[in-house]
Image (cartoon, grey):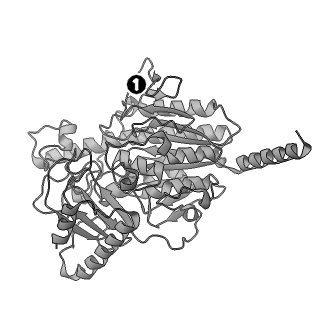
Amino acid sequence: MTLNIIALLLAAGLASADKSAEQPNILYIMSDDHAAHAIGAYGGRLATLDPTPNIDRLAEEGARLTNCFCTNSICTPSRATIMTGQYSHRNGVTTLNGSIPPERQTLAKMMKSAGYETAMIGKWHLKKEPAAFDYYAVLPGQGSYFNPIFRVRGKAPWPGSTIRASKYDSTHSSDAITDLSLKWLKNREQKDKPFFLMHHFKAPHDNFENAERYDWLYGDVDIPEPESLWKRENHGPKGHPQFGTSVGPRNTRRNMGHHMFVDENLSPEEYKRSAYQRYLKKFLRCVKGVDDNIGRLLDHLEATGELDNTVIVYTADQGFMLGEHDYIDKRWMYEESQRMPFVVRYPKAIKAGTTSDDLINNVDFAPTLLELAGVAKEEMPSDFQGRSFVGQLKGEKAEDWRDATYYRYWMHMAHHDNPAHYGIRTKDHKLIFFYGMPLDAPGAVREVTEPYWELYDLAKDPHEMNNVYDAPEYAEVVARLKKKLASIKKEVGDTDEQYPDLQRAVESTP
């Protein structure tokens, strides 16, 4: 080997080492169904209960997004969007029936190419093997809340090797997932590289089974109720009381009173109040387990001296309805379901207490994480449909940022009786078209419901109590937003030209 070649190899090695030294670790923590208004830092009605001190610390010492939204509020599609940087119609995962094979696990592949050791631990929910990661230990499907089984990367083919998290006393999934992440962090095989760890909690997904140590948490507390639990006013469609599963007995097929085993002999008011209190307490007990385990992760990073060199993200796969408008679950384009929490701590680049109200959504997560990893814009996949918001995290003003975010829910009338719909949200308004057709969405119920529109003036009505679509004074706003909706559908490639029945429904709806 000539001296010139040796010199070139040494230079390449030193350049690689320099890049690795500059790259931060990335810990991406995501829970399931943790609504932003159930996080203290977001200042909702539950903040007085101090439910999330560790997540609040991340927000206080870093940045918090106040207008972050999912593009399809349901678990599998949101996770697919985060992994691919694409909307549901583009990546093909429109419902819970979808999957992402290893060759399309873009975020993991790009992180590995950028020099990271990668791991996926916890709830995966994308069905195919997460083989793009160096290591994985994932729950099969939803997984169990207690003594969960994990599918782990090993010599056997997928689903292959399994391990069970169990002790003499039962082990909760939030504890078990954190145990596995800490074990991986302590015993990494490639410690010369920075790490990219996706740490995904199952909690607080229903049926809200908390660790036993929290059984009496909030036992003597009356959880604050949203006003819309009792007064729905002019929210939603009229004449459709069964749309959306409920806290109280409004939806006779499925409601939270059924889940919480509330005495059906109670009055409707007593039934609803009892169901709400049980629902929120179980939900918040699961949240407490998530937050405490985040504290364990922070303690480890602090003890190892890696805390300030690690980008720590906390988010959820979507929002969740916690009794607002007498709804449970997610799926809706309404605020509490569409909104995602997003906080990130990285003191080397992000000033403590930073906030951004730009309209950001989960197609933007992959390019943002990759930019934080040092990947240049020109190196990112050309089929990404989102943009990096690293500038906003640094407190910079974004140039030419979107003025509306697009949303679509495909799984028509399945599970929680939500009709299929799409729409846009601007900073001041939300326009939603409930087209009421299953189309070709796998898992949708094969029936048609009456189409209708909703418009909310978020500046005047942030809790979406008054659908003003038919109000004469909003005719100009409706026309403008419909034009904007058509433009965005064309921009993202979700034009529905293959569905002539839907096109006729749009044209025939006033």
Element type at mark 1:
loop
Outermost residue, front side: 1
Q: Amino acid at mark 1?
A: Asn
Note whether residue 234 is visible. no
Crowding at label 1, few (<14), some or many (≥20) Cα neighbours within 10 Å?
A: some
Nearer to me, 324 or 380: 380
Q: Position of residue 149 (x, y in %)?
A: 41, 26
Quarter of the view holding residue 453: bottom left
Q: How many marks?
A: 1
Residue at (65% x, 44% y) in the render:
115
Q: Is residue 224 above or below residue 283?
A: below
Q: Is residue 23 above or below residue 432?
A: above
Q: Position of residue 58 (x, y in %)?
A: 54, 51
Outermost residue, right side: 3
Task: Give the position of the C terminus as an image quadrant.
Answer: bottom left
Nearer to me, 1 or 251: 1
Task: Give the position of the N terminus as an image quadrant.
Answer: top right
Q: Which residue is mark 1?
A: 147
- Judge left or right: residue 231 versus residue 31: left
Q: Position of residue 233 (x, y in %)?
A: 17, 65
- Judge left or right: residue 185 versus residue 168: right
Nearer to me, 409 or 437: 437
Q: Position of residue 155 (x, y in %)?
A: 53, 23
Residue at (31% x, 58% y) in the render:
408
Q: Is residue 265 above or below residue 390?
A: above
Note whether residue 266 is visible. yes
Quarter of the view holding residue 467: bottom left
Nearer to me, 477 or 63: 477
